[in-house]
Each structure stands twice: as C-alpha cells, then as structure tokens.
Image: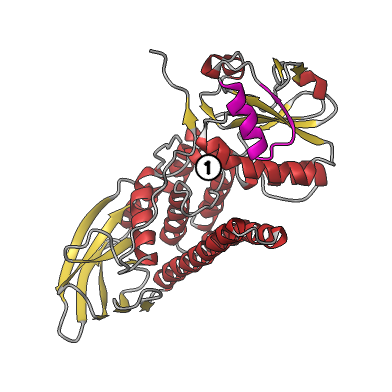
Amino acid sequence: MQKVVLIIGIVLSVVSKNYAQNPFTVSGVLKNSPSTVVYLEETDIASGIKTMKDSSGIGADGRFLITTKTNGESVYDLRLKNDVPPFVTIINDANTISLEADFNKKFDFYTVSGSRSSKAIQDFFSRLSDMQREKFNNFYRIDSLKKNNGPSLLINNLTARQKEISKEFKTYTQQLVQQSDKAPLSLFVLATYQGMTGDPNYGIDGFTGEEMLAFLDAMIKKFPGRTDLVGVRSTIESRIPKTLWVGKQAPEISLPDTEGKIVKLSSFRGQYVLVDFWASWCVPCRKENPNVVDAYNQFKGKNFTVLGVSLDQNRDAWKRAIVNDNLNWTHISDLKYWQSEVVPLYGFQSIPFNVLVDPAGKVVAENLRGNALEEKLSAILEGRMVKKTDNVTTYIIIAAVIIIGLLLAWYFVNNKKKKEPVKPQNRSQVKKRSKK
C-alpha cells in the first residue's frame, strides 16, 4: 500500500498563529495513576512532533493542575511520565478544562468537562471502542460457527453485520466532521479516522479523495477566516493520483481459461464486467475475494459478471484457489506470473487490481475494493443514491497521523490491558517484484 504524506494537519499547527496568547488551564483528578507526574503536550499533526508545554505533579488524592499560554485553539495530549502514548487528547476551545480519570477502568475510563471539542473527542474514541468490541465478538462467533458447521444463515447475518458496523462508524465520523464548529476538531477526527483505515485490525473504509475535498470545501465556507484551508485543499487535490483507465476503452484481453479455451474480454460486450487481476499466491487478493464473491452473488442477475485474470504460474494452485474461494465465474491466465502480457497492457504495479467495464467496453471505475465495489454496482445497476467511492483512500492517509491517531486510539481501547494487539500479518497489496 502506498501512503502519501498529506498536509491536512498543517491547519492544526497554523491555527495558533492567528491569535494572541491566552492562558489555558487543565486540571482534574487522576485516580489510581501509575505515575506521579503528568505532561501537557501540543501536537503538530502535520509532522507528528510533540512540544511539551508544561507538567504537574499528581497529588496523593490524584489532583493535578497545569496552566500554560496558548496562541489559539489547538490539539493537546496529556501523557503520564514514562508513557509514550497519551491517555487523553483535548482541544482548548475553553480557557478551563476539567478531567477525571480512573486508570483501573478498562473502558470509558475518563470524563472531560468544560470543553465541547474535548468531549467530542472522548465520544469519538468511546464509539470506536464500542465498534471494536462488537466486531471482535462477532469475529469469534463467526469463526466458531464455521469450525462447528453452524447455520450458514447466522454466519451470513453476522458477516453482514460486520460491514454495517464499519459503515455506521464511518457515517458517525462524517457527521461529526461536518457538524463541528471547530476546525481543529474536524481535522483531528478526519485525520485520525483516515489513519485507522491503514490498519486492517479496524476493518474500516476511508474517505475518498472527492469526499476529502468536499469536507475541505465545506470547512472553507464555514471558517472563512482560515485562509490556510485553501492551501491544504490544493495540496490534497494535487496528491490524489489520476486513474489509469476510467473513461477509456478497456484494452482487449485474449487468454486461455482453466480448460485451455481462449476467452476474450470483448466477448462480454453488452454486460458490465469486473476484470479482476489476482493470483492464488497473493494473500491480499485472497482476503479481498469474499468481497468480490458477495458482489457477484448480489448482482449476477443484473447484467453483471466477473472475469478473473490470474498472474499464477502453477495451474493446479490456480484452479484449487478458484474452488476454495468459491469464485464461480470465468477465469483466464497465461500462467506467466508478472511476465503476463496483461501487466504492461493495463499498467498496474500491484495486485489485487481491477477495472469495471461497461457494456460498450469503456472503463467506468477501477481498483474497487472493500465496500466500494458493492456501492458502485448499486449506483449503476440499481440506481441507488450512494456516495461515490474509489480506492484513492490509500493515497490520502496522513503518515504522521497514523502514528498519532493509531497510538492514541489503540491505547484508549486497550487501556491498561495486558493483552498485546493483533498485528497485521500481510500487506494490503502485493507489489510487482523488481527484475533481477
């Protein structure tokens, strides 16, 4: 997966430059704290650099008080001595913020008052925690049912619920960003959410390039004094990669199927066809296959089909993967790995990769992954009003926010638990290997 550093966080570091210095106080009670010192740090999300503003001792009763001067509204973290990740993130949209925390609690361990934006951040991470718990429980229920030959209807319902949970959290995030009256809050939530989309443990789809630009357009109107937002929008727009084939005729493909019979892409004229480039040895492809299967089963009776184009070398492994993954559509391959003629023909450098071709042979979308394929097909074949989705998400994840947002979110969800988080074992795409 490619990640491009985007300077959306610049706004959060620039915000403070437009205001005179004002005092800012955060105080409260930290129960059962493992440390006797708490630090207040200002975070530059663009670079990930934290600047310590001040610190306070934690009394025997857990009380602390920190007063510092600020140039305006910004993002601040509270961190205990000897701890790397912060335990709370706040925004100084008020001169005085109060905090109460109990470190013996595993969930919802703190409350904040006096600051609407800081309370919104607390609610955001609380909602994230709820989402993860439900998805985690559903995952193990599905796994147990599959191992014990449980009812397929229940398995399908739980699998569908997993997707709904992710959609609900994305909708919640979108509403929070749009309804916020504070630029730092909107950008922090948006950047943190986008950062989490790069981690498969969360299982959520990021916002597309078009959606990100729409967010920025709305912010520019809502905060007319923030001239720096215009520059951020321009930077985002310039970093969104152009599609390879959308709007163009799909190049002809003519390769043998699993029985050696030559099949041409042009033979599917009159139908919408997803040309899916994959391979049995490609782990990310195999993980993406269930999404393609779901889309195929849902739309196969609506003038839609799939053409699988494999970069396999071994015929038996190729055919075995088709059966095991229930890929019940036409498959073709020249079994030449990355030397396949389709690689330079379509110009992709990693798999999975796909293009959606319309009945006239023109490409109408590409690189549809996750829920994006279902949403695109729904819009085209059912005329449903859904948001336009593409795979630009992977290119607009903010590198610095991945560090800040993931550490913060992961620490919040697993606060003081002895359990190690599950680390992703595979990349989201398999890239073309360089020739030696």
Q: Residue 365: percent from the left, percent from the top?
A: 67, 33
Per the image, is 408 magenta? no
Give the extent of the magenta segment.
Answer: 314-332
Q: Quadrant of the C terminus?
A: top left
The single residue placed furthest to the front in the displayed view is: 148
The residue at which mark 1 appears reads as 393
Q: How is the image coloured?
A: secondary structure
User: Foreground: 352 or 65?
Assistant: 352
Q: Is residue 167 visible?
A: no
The single residue placed furthest to the bottom in the displayed view is: 61
Q: Residue 24: percent from the left, percent from the top?
A: 26, 71
* Amino acid at circle 1: Thr
- Judge left or right: residue 5 versus residue 242: left
Q: Is residue 140 visible?
A: yes
Residue at image location 49% in from the left, 34% down from the top: 429
Q: Residue 255: percent from the left, percent from the top?
A: 70, 16
Indicate the quadrant where residue 327 lies.
Answer: top right
- Judge left or right: residue 27 versus residue 419: left
Q: Is residue 6 above or below residue 82?
A: above
User: Foreground: 48 or 35?
Assistant: 35
User: Foreground: 34 or 326?
Assistant: 326
User: For the residue labelled by badge 1, is the local secondary structure a helix, a strand or a loop?
Assistant: helix
Residue at image location 32% in from the left, 60% down from the top: 19
Residue at image location 57% in from the left, 44% down from the top: 208
